[in-house]
């Protein structure tokens, strides 16, 4: 039987980041395009807020997240939701937690190709079967008809991951295109995880968030504010899913850093 040790793999992009830093340390120029890092930039507004609102004692936060932040997420991102539908944690950690909340070992997950590497790593760790779907046709970005694709698969996926805007490609499919592809999936018994890490970094009129279709949604406070090292993401889901995600947080990392969680964003 395969050991847990064999199933735990590191993120390849952090290997690239280490190589980039080594070259910079030795005096070489590196064009930073590898991981959404922000060298040479400090978000002064976030820095000032952390200094201003840091608690006097660095206490544990609730594993679901500090109420001040979950309330703000509900108010600003998903105003028709409840606090129990939101969980706070590093966005990359929430990938594994979201998959764990909706699958059992041996289930099939449908992942975009190209796509963010952590989904494969998390699926392998959780013992899931992976099938990929392409977001290209004839070398042109195109979001596929996922319902039609699924009906022709040998294994019915339990979960489909939709990464829009795409990480790492930066492609943003309009929500009417994505929603048309997804509208029949709940009827097929397929759960949807929406990775919307870059949804608040779209600077044109493209509307990408597909909120009328039920699913688990992952976003990133850290990326939105160009402060990835804060490691604060947030997710929306049904109360069973978010409870599972919070429980996994409690089991593994306990909670997000309190000094950051107390900042009213």
Image (spheres, rainbow, N blue to C red):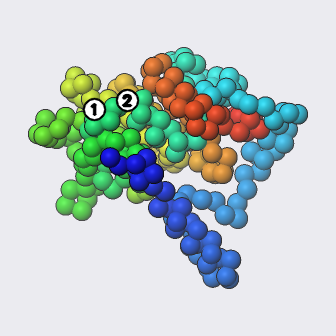
In terms of sequence position, does the residue under pointer 2 or pointer 1 come before the other? 2
Residue in front for this viewpoint, 60 or 164: 60
Q: Position of residue 136 (x, y in %)?
A: 25, 55
Residue in front for this viewpoint, 151 or 109: 109
Q: Position of residue 53 (x, y in %)?
A: 82, 35
Whether residue 207 is visible here, answered yes or no, is: no
Residue at the (58%, 37%) spot, across then down:
252
Residue at the (28%, 46%) spot, across then down:
130
Q: Position of residue 33 (x, y in %)?
A: 52, 66
User: Are dots 2 and 1 in contact, CB under 8 Å?
Assistant: yes
Image disc number at residue 102 = 2
Q: Position of residue 49 (x, y in %)?
A: 79, 40
Residue at the (66%, 51%) spot, across then down:
229
Q: Quadrant of the C terminus?
A: top right
Separation of marks 2 and 1 at Cα, in angstroms: 8 Å
Q: Please identify the residue farthest to the right as the structure is shown.
A: 56
Residue identifier under label 1: 158
Relative to 61, 228 lies left or right? left
Examine the image and state in which quarter residue 192 appears.
top left
């Amino acid at each position: 039987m395969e050991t847990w040790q064999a199933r735990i793999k590191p993120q390849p992009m952090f290997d690239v980041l280490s190589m980039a830093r080594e070259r910079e340390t030795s005096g070489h120029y590196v064009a930073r395009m590898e991981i959404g890092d922000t060298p040479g930039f400090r978000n002064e507004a976030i820095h000032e807020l952390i200094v201003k609102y840091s608690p006097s004692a660095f206490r544990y936060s609730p594993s679901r997240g500090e109420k001040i932040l979950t309330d703000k997420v509900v108010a600003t991102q998903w105003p028709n939701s409840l606090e129990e539908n939101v969980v706070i944690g590093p966005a990359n950690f929430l990938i594994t937690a979201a998959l764990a909340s909706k699958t059992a070992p041996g289930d099939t997950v449908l992942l975009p190709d190209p796509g963010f590497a952590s989904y494969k790593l998390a699926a392998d760790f959780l013992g899931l079967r992976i099938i990929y779907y392409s977001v290209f046709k004839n070398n042109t970005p195109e979001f596929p008809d996922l319902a039609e694709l699924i009906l022709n698969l040998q294994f019915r996926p339990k979960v489909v991951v939709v990464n829009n805007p795409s990480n790492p490609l930066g492609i943003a499919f309009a929500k009417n295109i994505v929603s048309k592809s997804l509208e029949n999936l709940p009827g097929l018994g397929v759960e949807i995880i929406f990775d919307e890490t870059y949804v608040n970094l779209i600077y044109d009129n493209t509307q990408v968030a597909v909120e009328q279709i039920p699913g688990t949604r992952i976003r990133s406070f850290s990326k939105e504010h160009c402060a990835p090292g804060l490691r604060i993401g947030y997710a929306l889901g049904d109360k069973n899913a978010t409870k599972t995600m919070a429980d996994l947080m409690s089991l593994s990392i306990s909670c997000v850093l309190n000094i950051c969680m107390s900042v009213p964003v």
